[in-house]
Image (tube, rainbow, N blue to C red):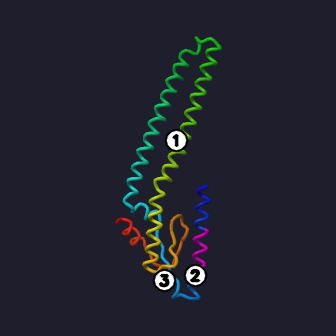
């Protein structure tokens, strides 16, 4: 799913670049193009590090809980192995089933934790991304840019400095305020 998003982003950037180049050849004075790195802009926002710290704390909590569950399982499994030969067949099957269920529960928890972490990251980055988008729009309006390209993910492998301007420093400075 993430690669589809990158593909769409790259395709959109390519289309915009082609349109811009076509426009440039017919009316070079009318189109003003700039480019920046969205990832660098995100990281320049002061709230980005706070969000990353919060996500790291959450990640550590999940890791701690997964480790605790793993240790619990290992303890039960070792106990089972120590006593397996002395257990009646029906008790042995019951404990094997319990261990299997315990292990499956741990796997479900791990998967759910990973899903929740991905969602927490999206939720933490969304307002910062919105701020970046708003900042870029403001810079476009103030500086008169018609097109601003995001150079992340190799979406724009080359853009001529003759027809465009690098606004990374401008975006990062605006976000730092």
Looking at the image, tell me whether mark 1 or mark 2 is earlier in sequence order.
Answer: 2
Residue ID at (62%, 16%): 92
- Residue 15 in percent (x, y) is at 61, 74
Q: Are marks 3 and 2 in contact (CB under 8 Å)?
A: no
**Structural crowding at the residue carrying mark 2, measured as other residues with C-alpha within 10 Å and reported as few (<14), some (14–19) or many (≥20):** some
Examine the image and state in which quarter residue 109 appears: top right
**Structural crowding at the residue carrying mark 3, measured as other residues with C-alpha within 10 Å and reported as few (<14), some (14–19) or many (≥20):** few
From the image, give the main secondary structure of the stretch colored magenta: helix
Residue ID at (49%, 23%): 75
Q: Which residues are magenta?
A: 11-22
**Residue assigned mark 1:** 113
- Residue 24 in percent (x, y) is at 56, 85
Residue 21's disc is: 2
Give the structural element (helix, strand or loop) at label 3.
Answer: loop
Judged by depth in the image, the label closer to the viewer, 1 or 2, is 1
Q: CA distance from mark 3 to mark 2?
A: 11 Å
**Residue assigned mark 3:** 162
Examine the image and state in which quarter residue 107 appears: top right
Residue 19's disc is: none
Looking at the image, tell me whether mark 3 or mark 2 is earlier in sequence order.
Answer: 2
Give the structural element (helix, strand or loop) at label 2.
Answer: helix
Looking at the image, tell me whether mark 1 or mark 3 is earlier in sequence order.
Answer: 1
Residue 22, compared with residue 16, is above or below; it is: below
Q: Nearer the viewer, residue 107 or 131?
A: 131
Give the structural element (helix, strand or loop) at label 1.
Answer: helix
């Amino acid at each position: 799913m993430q690669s589809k998003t990158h593909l769409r982003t790259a395709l959109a950037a390519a289309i915009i670049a082609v349109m811009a180049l076509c426009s440039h050849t017919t009316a070079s004075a009318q189109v003003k193009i700039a480019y920046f790195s969205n990832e660098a802009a995100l990281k320049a926002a002061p709230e980005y590090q706070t969000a990353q710290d919060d996500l790291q704390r959450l990640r550590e909590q999940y890791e701690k809980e997964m480790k605790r569950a793993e240790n619990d399982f290992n303890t039960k499994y070792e106990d089972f192995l120590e006593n397996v030969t002395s257990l009646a067949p029906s008790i042995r099957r019951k404990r094997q089933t319990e261990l299997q269920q315990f292990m499956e529960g741990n796997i479900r928890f791990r998967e759910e934790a990973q899903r929740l972490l991905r969602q927490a990251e999206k939720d933490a980055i969304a307002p910062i991304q919105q701020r970046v988008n708003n900042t870029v729009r403001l810079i476009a309006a103030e500086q008169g840019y018609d097109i601003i390209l995001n150079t992340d993910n190799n979406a724009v492998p080359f853009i001529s400095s003759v027809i465009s301007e690098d606004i990374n420093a401008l975006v990062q400075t605006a976000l730092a305020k």
